[in-house]
Amino acid sequence: MLETERTVDPMKLRQWLRRFGSGEWGGWPEQAYQRDAYQQRLSAVQEHLAECLDTAPPGPVHIISICAGDGRDVIGVLESHPRRDDVSAWLVESNEQSVDFGIRRAQSAGLERTVNFVNEDATDYVTYRNMAPADIVLVCGVWGHVPTPERKLLLRAIASLCKPNGVVIWTRGVSKGMHRLHEIEALFAESPPSWTTARISLTSDKKWGVVTHRYCGQTLERPEAGRIFRFERSAGR
């Protein structure tokens, strides 16, 4: 007797891949932030984020974090910031373990109604269909995983996720040379619609650059679906 052909539920397959298919990133934030370089990057990103919240106009503040990990940068600022009740934050992360840790962290800080984790693919436009545009977009620890030919695609996506006069906070490793930071700065400088540099800082160990850019363009149409970029482990490192 022939074996009956089995059909695969696409949703269940996607959930399985999220749980088991990204095992190399399992526990990544906890391991990485035991290292001083990442602690310094975290502190610098939190300084930039706190400053953006300090200067944001009165009223609601909407945050999107791309490849957010367990969200400790956003949660660490919001738990004590006076604007915390104005904020709605959407943190996109594909690794389920990181999301679980982040949810517990947000609950411990009393931010379960403020910080929303989205356990989806941050490189797909469809993920952002109900959360953009934002006043503040975080793209931290991402550029080193974006193939060089696709970086303009990511920058355009960031513009489409950002409100006019909103900001993006991004990081770039510079331990192998400042040219790595300057390459990303040049993309912002050359990109229409325009951006202005609000703040640049380096960690004290000179291993990370953290930059805030302000979006000076108009609302940019965002595709309903489609790949933004390919996330690769060591692209452009």
Image (cartoon, rainbow, N blue to C red):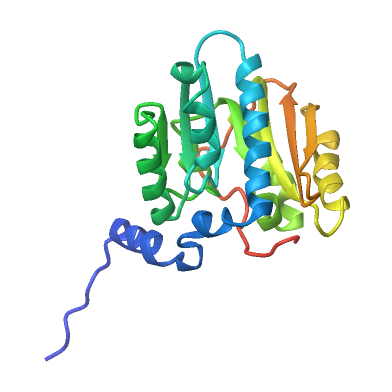
**Which residue occupies 49% across, 41% down?**
71
Depth check: 150 or 30 in front? 30
Q: Judge whether 3 appears above or below 104 on screen.
A: below
**Which residue occupies 62% across, 34% down?**
46
Depth check: 127 or 50 in front? 50
Q: Position of residue 63 (x, y in %)?
A: 53, 28
Which quarter shows the C terminus?
bottom right
Q: Judge whether 163 appears above or below 41 on screen.
A: above
Q: Is residue 170 left or right of residue 100?
A: right
**Which residue occupies 53% across, 60% down?**
31
**Which residue occupies 45% across, 62% down?**
26
Q: Position of residue 117 (x, y in %)?
A: 41, 40
Q: Position of residue 11 (x, y in %)?
A: 31, 56
Q: Judge whether 123 appears above or below 133 on screen.
A: below
Q: Is residue 122 left or right of residue 181?
A: left
Which quarter shows the N terminus?
bottom left
